[in-house]
Image (spheres, grey):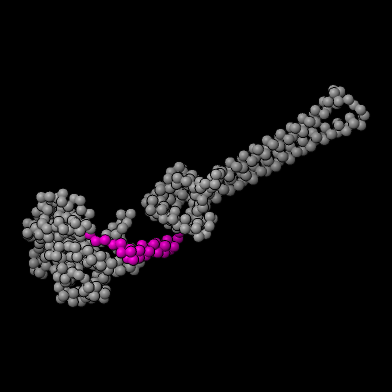
């Protein structure tokens, strides 16, 4: 943009200066020709007055040419001074402005970047020019930005359009920007790309927009019933038969964001409970295709267990109460156990069971167990990984088995990934096991139908599961 303006000014100055010189040269040549013609006698003198007039004319042309040349040179000098001042001003603005000025061609490659890219994105302009814009913006965000620009242009015409874009700093941190962009035009009238300016949004504005985006994404998942359920098998270790499954929510995402991310985001905008109920509904609906003898472990937060809607919701489920296990994770803090215990008591009297997840990963898990007295204790992967070679882990595992007997609970070893781990937890007397070695989570009912016995000698059976 700046280079085009500078080049245009230089071309006009060059053409204008050479045209002026040409005119002056013609005038001088014409005057000299008259003087030579009179002096050499080529033009016959008729009257002395005519000679005087021609001589005066020649002199006047010379003086006029000299005056025009001096004035033209002065004007040319002033024009060049103004062009230089304008160019210097553009350089100053581009170099000192906190707004990032940029331009990309029709292929999305940077053709210009101001110095502000250093402060905002950590990239020197020379590191961006000639590179695709995906260097500083993710493909999905770029697609959203193009869609927003197209909508803004449709609503406001072909002029400038302001959109919010999340760029990526050199260190990987997100940079929220308010972008003003317009299409640049080639000589043939075709789009040659885009040019615009970007400024960083204040933290408050960025948080407000982020909250709005999260809310829209969660509501779209809720209204569109986009939540899927994957089941992972849980086997009895004494006889190798399947005893239950854990229901795991799956969300559509091109960014590969997992369920924890979705639930955490939903919690930040006050939709955590709604998302959990939607995941419950999906799991209970899908559970109708499971073998009739297995129970279904449903992950719930303490907050959702306290929700007055939960009892009625579970009453409407197609599953019998003895096939429903409410699995509480120890990662979620519980401030007051008395209300939680009171809310779970009538459900347990109906036949529903309670499980505590991730037990053994910290003090909070033991507090959960002591306060809630669960029916099922699920030992965390951190306790199971490498247990066959660690005497400390084996001692803790054996203690947990004995503790479970004392309170009337059963033990499920989570995260079994090798045959050696399976053998170790079985020898310690753990009741059931779950993990990739036994079966991966899958959303395919055809896979659920194959779950009957432990795949001890055929680990490939679960390799293709989702």
Point 30% across, 69% down: residue = 274
* Residue 384 in view, yes or no: no
**So how many labels did they put on this image?**
0
Magenta span contains residue 229: yes
Residue 427 percent location from the top left of the image: 7, 56
Point 49% across, 49% down: residue = 194
* Residue 69 in view, yes or no: yes
Task: Say whether residue 190 is left or right of residue 396.
Answer: right
Task: Say whether residue 139 is left or right of residue 355.
Answer: right
Residue 186 lies, with reference to residue 21, above or below; the image says below
Residue 200 percent location from the top left of the image: 46, 56
Res 204 quadrant in image: bottom left
Residue 97 lies, with reference to residue 304, above or below; the image says above
Task: Say whether residue 213 is left or right of residue 390.
Answer: right
Residue 14 lies, with reference to residue 435, above or below; the image says above
Residue 221 percent location from the top left of the image: 33, 63
Point 79% across, 33% down: residue = 62
Magenta span contains residue 154: no
Range shown magenta? 201-230
Report the predominant secondary structure element of the magenta stretch: helix
Q: Nearer the viewer, residue 84 or 211?
A: 211
Q: Nearer the viewer, residue 276 or 65?
A: 276
Q: Nearer the viewer, residue 463 or 398?
A: 463
Quadrant in which the C terminus is drawn: bottom left
Point 61% across, 46% down: residue = 85
Residue 441 percent location from the top left of the image: 20, 57
């Amino acid at each position: 943009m700046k280079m085009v303006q500078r080049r245009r000014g230089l071309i006009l100055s060059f053409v204008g200066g050479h045209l002026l010189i040409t005119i002056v040269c013609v005038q001088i040549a014409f005057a000299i020709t008259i003087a030579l013609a009179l002096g050499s006698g080529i033009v016959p003198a008729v009257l002395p007055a005519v000679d005087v007039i021609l001589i005066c004319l020649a002199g006047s042309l010379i003086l006029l040419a000299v005056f025009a040349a001096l004035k033209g040179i002065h004007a040319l000098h002033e024009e060049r001074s103004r062009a230089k001042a304008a160019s210097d001003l553009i350089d100053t603005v581009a170099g000192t402005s906190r707004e990032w000025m940029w331009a990309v061609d029709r292929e999305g490659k940077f053709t210009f970047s101001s110095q502000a890219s250093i402060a905002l994105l950590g990239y020197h302009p020379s590191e961006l020019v000639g590179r695709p814009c995906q260097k500083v913006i993710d493909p999905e965000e770029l697609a959203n930005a193009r869609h927003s620009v197209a909508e803004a242009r449709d609503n406001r015409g072909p002029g400038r359009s302001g959109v919010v874009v999340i760029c990526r700093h050199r260190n990987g941190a997100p940079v929220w920007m308010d972008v003003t962009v317009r299409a640049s035009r080639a000589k043939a009238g075709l789009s040659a790309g885009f040019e615009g300016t970007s400024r960083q949004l204040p933290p408050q504005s960025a948080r407000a927009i982020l909250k709005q985006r999260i809310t829209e994404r969660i509501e779209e998942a809720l209204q569109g019933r986009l939540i899927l359920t994957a089941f992972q098998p849980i086997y009895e270790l004494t006889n190798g038969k399947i005893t239950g499954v854990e229901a795991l929510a799956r969300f559509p995402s091109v960014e590969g964001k997992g369920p924890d991310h979705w639930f955490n985001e939903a919690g930040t905008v006050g939709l955590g409970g709604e998302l959990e109920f939607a995941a419950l509904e999906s799991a209970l609906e899908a559970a109708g295709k499971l073998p009739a003898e297995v129970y279904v472990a449903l992950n719930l937060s303490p907050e959702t267990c306290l929700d007055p809607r939960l009892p009625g919701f579970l009453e409407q489920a197609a599953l019998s109460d003895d096939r429903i296990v409410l699995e509480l994770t120890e990662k979620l803090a519980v401030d007051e156990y008395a209300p939680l215990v009171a809310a779970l008591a009538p459900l347990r009297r109906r036949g529903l069971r309670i499980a505590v997840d991730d037990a053994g990963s910290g003090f909070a898990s033991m507090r959960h167990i002591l306060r809630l007295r669960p029916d099922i204790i699920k030992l965390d992967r951190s306790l199971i990984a490498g247990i066959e070679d660690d005497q400390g882990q084996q001692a803790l595992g054996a203690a947990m088995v004995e503790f479970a007997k004392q309170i009337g609970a059963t033990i499920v070893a989570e995260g079994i990934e090798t045959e050696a781990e399976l053998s170790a937890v079985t020898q310690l007397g753990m009741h059931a096991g779950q993990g990739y070695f036994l079966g991966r989570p899958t959303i395919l009912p055809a896979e659920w139908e194959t779950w009957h016995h432990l795949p001890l000698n055929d680990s490939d059976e679960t390799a293709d599961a989702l």
